[in-house]
Amino acid sequence: MSKWLLRGLVFAALMVVVRLLQGALINAFESSALIISIALVVAYAVAAFIWGNIDGRADARANPDPDRRGDLAMTWLLAGLFAGIVSGFVSWLISLFYDNLYAEGLLNEVTTFAAFTALLTFVAAIAGVSLGRVLVDRKAPPVQRRSAEDDRADTDVFAAVGARDYPDDGSSAEGAQAARTDQIGTTVTSPRESEEAGTAPTTTEGRQQP
């Protein structure tokens, strides 16, 4: 199961429970409806904050280099959207049979209320992620990061190997020149040069031509 799906399912169920408690408590204590609603929303946000803090700590320990850490922002954004839409739909469905649950129409539940749930979940969780990473980074040793000079150093190693296998210094040039000279010395003697020397033309093996 994906990380965002697991978190989305948990917080969708939690939001449904929060709304059920809200309806029951407001019916019992109508004068304290505002306080009850705020307290339940804060409790929901604290739950998202705690889970986000756990995620941030675990990610920071697994990846000391901040550049190599996971994208928890996208994880929690998807989880919040999923939780908002699913909890809105389920709450609307329950309100058809349970009058104490206060729910709007289906369209409002899966749009307006879903957006509120997604935003609340995302903000609280990312705050927890950030705090968790900061707390781990404060106690962690400095991270040795790779720089452009390190990449060039790796390239220089391959360049050194190539230079060793294919030297291009003066000695190799002199060797190539000597090889060409030897090759020229073994070529066929022209007839004119042979007549001037008083000998018959020769081949590379030194045999006289007829």
Image (cartoon, rainbow, N blue to C red):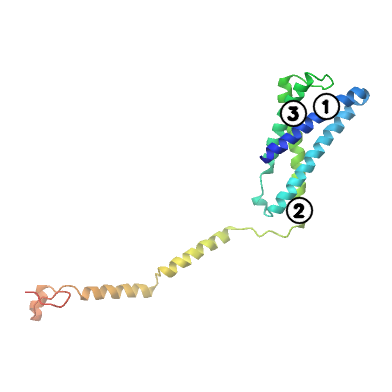
In this rendered view, identify the residue nearer to me: 146 or 52.
52
Q: Work out which residue is located at the far left of the displayed protein and give it.
A: 210
Residue type at numbered disc 3: Ser
Give the label, 1 or 2, closer to the camera.
1
| Residue 56 x, y percent position in the rendering | 73, 47
Q: Residue 20, which numbered label?
A: 1
Q: Is residue 206 above or below residue 15?
A: below
Pointer 2 residue: 136
Pointer 3 residue: 87
Q: Is residue 117 above or below residue 167?
A: above
| Residue 30 x, y percent position in the rendering | 92, 23
Mark 1 crowdedness (10 Å alpha carbons): few <14, some 14-19, many ≥20: some
Tell me if 36 is positioned left or right of 179 in this view.
right
The image quadrant that residue 141 belongs to is bottom right
CA gap, disc 1 and disc 2: 37 Å
Instruction: Identify which residue is drawn at 21% across, 76% down.
Output: 185
Q: Is residue 88 above or below residue 177?
A: above
